[in-house]
Image (cartoon, rainbow, N blue to C red):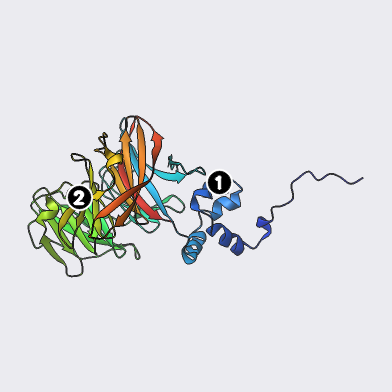
Amino acid sequence: MEKEQSSEPPSLITSLPEDLIIDIIARVGRCDYPTLSLVSKHFRSLVSSSQLYVRRSLLGCTEHCLYVLLRNTEIWDKRWYILRRKPNGDCRLVLIPSLPTMPRCGSFVAVGSKIYVFGGINLHNLARRELSIDCRSHTVQTLPSIPIHMDNIVADVIDGKIYVTGYSYIDRREVMMVFNTESLMWETEVRKPEIELGNRQPSYVVVMGDKMYMSYTQNGFVYDPKESTWEKDEMLYSKRWEGACVVDDVLYYYDSYKKELRTYDPKKRCWGVVNGLDELFRGRRWSMMRRSCYGGKLALFLPKLEQIWCAEISLERRQGGEIWGKVEWCGEVLSSRDLSLSKALAVML
């Protein structure tokens, strides 16, 4: 009498060559990777491997994933969450437990599949460190420190180089250093604006058309890294565009007073408004909104009572230059009275 088999037959996919398994998984939406990682230790290592993400890029299967930094208002910890889409289409913010707390007042920039962290103070050890976060594996690497001490840092990226601006007490002025994300080295040149910026702390910074646009308390400035030139832009300074983001070289920010999503066109140097969103903003005061752009769309993260909501908005430029928005999805993504929004970034994975 034959003995009954006590185990399940091996999975067909695990018997395939590993290159073919990677090719199959690369075509699967990343929202399903948490489930795939539960299949086995082998699958868990595959979904975080660099080889898989190289294959996704070659196949054109990369996606924008949204990472949101939330601050605990009781203990002041800042932790990263990822926005994950459920099978029914709803989204939830999920804590990434493997990532450490982030420094207070740090500047955060996304380049490809990584998030770079500059400046700020870690409340647990009071150390200042520059970091990179690999969002494929959710691991952290220490970067070379900024060559000169800078306070009140802001940063943004152009062509794989991160331009970090802050106040140097040695030079007694605003200075800029450049970090190369390919070589992971700082350029030796300290860039000093040839015009007076008028304040020790830039309020906001974005990149449009390979130029950096900065707002200070006394004026707006545009920096062209190719020409190493600075110029004033008084129209840019006329609005408080805190937490703005850029889609197709147009700046977007939420005006909490007029309850409108405003735009700034750097070519025309004029402000406008996104039409079609009255229903989203009517009767609601969402002053602490955080924005991020991904795949030509806007993601608006909104505090609402003891919840955090997210609205996904597609954009359309119509004849005559008017920009219209359409709410593709809106709903609660997290319930917590102790968490507040700090930063939202789109990462390519």
- Residue drawn where x is 36% and y is 38% of the image: 309
Left/right of residue 180 with respect to residue 166 in the rendered view: right
Q: Nearer the viewer, residue 207 or 304?
A: 304
For the residue labelled by badge 1, is the local secondary structure a helix, a strand or a loop? helix
Quadrant for the N terminus in the image: top right
How many residues crowd around disc 2 within 10 Å: few (fewer than 14), some, or many (20 or more)?
Answer: some
Camera-nearest residue between 147 and 11: 11
* Amino acid type, residue under disc 1 in the picture: Thr
Q: How far across and down, in percent of the image, does residue 156 sit?
A: 26, 56
In the image, 16: left or right of 75? right
Residue 155 rendering spot, x and y as whole percentages: 24, 54
Vertical comparison of 88 with 75: above or below: below
Q: Determine the image quadrant of residue 315.
A: bottom left
Residue matched to label 2: 204
| Quadrant position of residue 347 | bottom left
Q: Residue 35 — which label?
A: 1
> Which kind of residue does numbered mark 2 sit on?
Tyr
> Residue at position x 46%, y 45% from top?
85
- For the residues labelled 1 and 2, the Cα–Cα distance comes to 39 Å
Most extreme residue toward the bottom is 227
Count of numbered labels shown in the rendering? 2
The part of the image, by quadrant, that contains residue 174 is bottom left
* SS at mark 2 in the image: strand
